[in-house]
Image (spheres, helix red, strand yellow):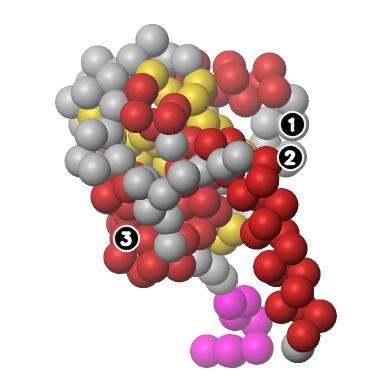
Amino acid sequence: MDYATLEPSLYTVKAVFILDNDGNRLLSKHYDPGLYPSMKEQKNFERNVFNKTHKADNEIAFVEGMTVVYKSSIDLFFYVVGSAEENELMLVSVLSCLFESLSQILRKNVERRCLLDNMEGVFLIVDEIIDGGVILESDPQLVLQKVNYRADENPLSEQSVAQVLQSAKEQIKWSILK
């Protein structure tokens, strides 16, 4: 066997999205710009996936030449999309990591309202699991450690201007003293 012709490959994801029980987009990240270049095409793909999966009792589907793994919880649908050649077990591990990580930060209350209230944490988790379509992490405990997100901390939007300015002053002071 000629090992020089074998190219190393990384496990990749084409898209991750979360839809509500009506099929409306709550979060969507598409990592292959050539696959669905416009927002309209992305939403059409998401709608097509939702229509084929929301009443099914499966965990995996093959839609438009893509492997789709999915999970539902109360009023949310979580989807991870890979190419037809992608390892389904890796896609399922990404989906499980995403769901378990979100379950931790939402205190086991994985529903639409709680998800929308903690959207900054949701984006941090997705970005920690997948970067540019490449799967970086599939262990929810490591993801939560890296994100270091606590649902009971005040998000930036709830901090007063004085608190933000004080925090900025402290950071500047420490960067100058180093």
Residue bearing the label numbered 3:
140
Q: Which is in the foreground here, disc 2 or disc 3?
A: 3
Q: Residue at x 50, y 59 (%)?
A: 128
Query: In the rendered view, does 43 fall on the left or right side of 60?
Result: right
Residue bearing the label numbered 2:
34
Q: Residue at x 77, y 69 (%)?
A: 172
Q: Say what amino acid the circle numbered 3 marks.
A: Pro
Q: Say what amino acid the circle numbered 1 marks.
A: Pro
Label 1 residue SS: loop
Instruction: Find the distance from the CA under tag 2 to the CA under tag 3.
Output: 30 Å
Up/down of 129 relative to 70, above or below: below
* Image: magenta residue range: 1-8
Q: Looking at the rendering, which quadrant does residue 22 occupy?
A: top left
Label 3 residue SS: helix
Up/down of 89 relative to 32, above or below: below
Asked if disc 3 and disc 1 are in contact, CB closer than 8 Å, the reply is no
Q: Residue at x 67, y 41 (%)?
A: 161
Asked if disc 1 and disc 2 are in contact, CB closer than 8 Å, the reply is yes
Q: Position of residue 154 (x, y in %)?
A: 46, 45
Label 2 residue SS: loop
Q: Earlier in the sequence, mark 3 or mark 1?
A: 1
Q: Say what amino acid the circle numbered 2 marks.
A: Gly
Q: Residue at x 53, y 36 (%)?
A: 158
